Amino acid sequence: MAEQRRIGFRWNLRTVMAQRNLWKTTELMPLLKSRGINLSESQVYRLVTGTPERIPARTFAALCDILDCEPNDLFEIVVELRAAATANAPKRSEDLGVKSGDPIAYRVRLVADDEDE
């Protein structure tokens, strides 16, 4: 069966901050500002609590400097393997042995043995 690789990532900024005893986004703001990165309170909050789709290289470098970490500590690549859409699965239910109009499940009635009475 063919597989499709889907590339994603995990943003670990909050975890790395916690390991360095930085618990609040407001504690990160002056540290960024001292490195020439001027972000609003809401931008820093979203950077910490969310997963950014894009981040300026200078901001990323400043975070690595502040947290004394490597880029791969903040940004972890994740590979997911999924069955490709063109897998060799049957397209029609008839190919599986199921006919139109046949019940999918049957009602089952449990009857107690004579010994149990």
Image (spheres, grey):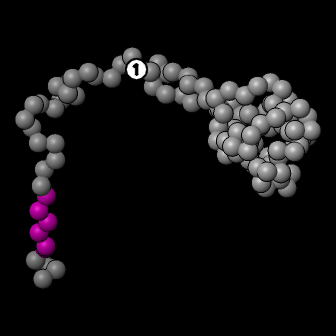
Residue 69 shows in this picture: no
- Say which quarter of the image contains residue 113: bottom left
Report x, y in % for residue 93: 20, 27
| In this picture, residue 43 sits left or right of residue 17 | left
Query: Residue 112 colored magenta?
Result: yes
Q: Residue at x 45, y 25 (%)?
A: 83
Report x, y in % for residue 105: 16, 47
Q: Residue extending furthest bottom?
A: 117
Which of the image's four quarters has the N terminus?
Answer: top left
Q: Return the residue nearer the eye: 2 or 52.
A: 52
Residue 93 shows in this picture: yes
Q: In the rendered view, would you say 8 is above or below 85?
A: below
Which of the image's four quarters has the C terminus?
Answer: bottom left
Q: Residue at x 68, y 26 (%)?
A: 54
Residue located beneath label 1 in the image:
85
Q: Return the residue nearer the eye: 45 or 82.
A: 45
- Say which quarter of the image contains residue 62: top right
Q: Residue at x 11, y 42 (%)?
A: 103
Q: In the image, what residue type sits under mark 1?
A: Ala
Q: Return the residue nearer the eye: 18 or 41.
A: 41
Q: Residue extending furthest left?
A: 101
Q: Residue at x 47, y 18 (%)?
A: 2
Query: Residue 25 colored magenta?
Result: no
Q: In the rendered view, would you say 99 is above or below 27?
A: above
Q: In the rendered view, would you say 18 is above or below 114?
A: above
Magenta stretch in the rendered image: 108-113
